[in-house]
Amino acid sequence: MVSIAEAREFNQLNTVVDIHAHPVLKTYLFDYNLCEMHQNPLPVIGFNPFYLQVDIPKLLQGGIDVVFVVDFRKESLKNGAVDNTYYTSSL
């Protein structure tokens, strides 16, 4: 069994990557600000699909160094061809 002190030391000595945070979709759908800490408005429910559990303050608090994020881009047809124009947003 690993102690909390050993886990914290391991975390500090290594780069921690979260590959399952996926904040982008809910940020887009529900207009969340990732720079603000969010609390679950319905804490009695174990799973709330409308609640964003990930935000930058929580990631920093948890010692996460890197977040793997998938970028969803809209594709549209222009003159019969797929238009892969990049859509960007900022925090």
Image (spheres, rainbow, N blue to C red):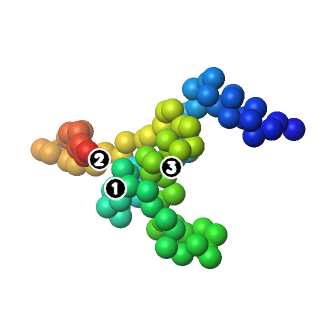
**Image spot of residue 58 (x, y percent):** 50, 49
Residue 60 position (above or below residue 17): below
Kind of residue sitting beneath label 1: Asn
Distance in Å between CA atoms under marks 2 and 1: 7 Å
| Residue mark closest to the camera, 1 vs 3 | 3
Q: Is residue 80 visible?
A: yes
Q: Do the residues labelled 2 and 1 touch (CB within 8 Å)?
A: yes
At 58% from the left and 72% from the top, the residue drawn is 43
Q: Can residue 82 be seen in this view?
A: no
Which callout, 1 or 3, points at the residue further toward the start of the chain? Answer: 1
At horizontal 61% and vertical 28% (from top left) the residue drawn is 12
What label does residue 15 carry, if any? none
Residue furthest out toward the right: 1
Mark 2 Cα within 10 Å, few/some/many (few <14, many 20+)? few
Which residue was labeled with disc 3?
Answer: 58
Where the N terminus falls, by quadrant?
A: top right
Amino acid type, residue under disc 2 in the picture: Leu
- As helix, strand or loop, the secondary structure at mark 3 comes to helix
Task: Kindly identify which residue carries mark 1.
Answer: 33
Which residue lies at the image location 38% right of the left edge and 55% below the top edge? 36
Q: Relative to the observer, which residue lies in front, 51 or 58?
A: 58
Mark 3 vs 2: CB contact within 8 A: no
Q: Which mark is residue 91?
A: 2
Residue lying furthest front: 5
